[in-house]
Amino acid sequence: MRIKPKQVEDQGTRHALKLLLHARQHRQRCYESTYQFIINICLVQGEIIVASLLFVLLVKDWEMKRAATQIREQERARTQALPVTRHKLGSLHGSPPSKRMLKMILSKAQNEIMLDPAEESNRPRREAALQALCNI
């Protein structure tokens, strides 16, 4: 999945997104609060598609870390001949992205979808909201 900062209209949001993507590219730790901050900015600026893509990126990162941890623990258990318990695995891969972040995106999408469909000027916002839902 590629998020292109050039597609973000607001210059400040574009720069924040560039910094986040640059940090990820160089394997720097990006805290969930950083994602939360940029997602908030995107939603305020009307960039719901970018916000949804960032949330999906955060979920995929979490899934990959979780899978890598499970593989390491299974390998360790196999070499030490110890049983791997689900409880033991669950405590090592961190928590999933916050529901609060998802709710913010869904709430914004719902508000955009509820705009008057007869009003032609609402069409791009409604389509962006639908695309964001598809991403998630």
Image: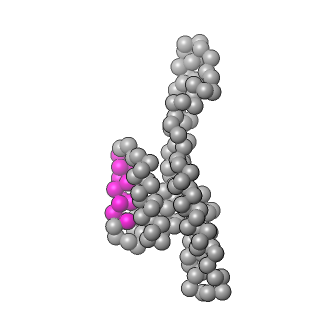
Q: Residue at x 65, y 82 (%)?
A: 117
Residue 24 lies in the magenta stretch: yes
Q: Is residue 99 visible?
A: yes
Q: Residue 8: x, y in percent? A: 42, 69
Q: Residue 98: x, y in percent? A: 53, 49
Q: Residue at x 56, y 76 (%)?
A: 125
Q: Is residue 105 above or below residue 89?
A: below
Q: Is residue 67 above or below residue 61?
A: above
Q: Residue 135: x, y in percent? A: 59, 60
Task: Place residue 116 in its image quadrant.
Answer: bottom right
Task: Place residue 18 in its image quadrant.
Answer: bottom left
What segment carries the magenta color?
A: 13-26
Q: Is residue 4 visible?
A: no
Q: How many marks overall?
A: 0
Q: Residue at x 45, y 55 (%)?
A: 36
Question: Camera-side residue: 50 or 102?
Answer: 102
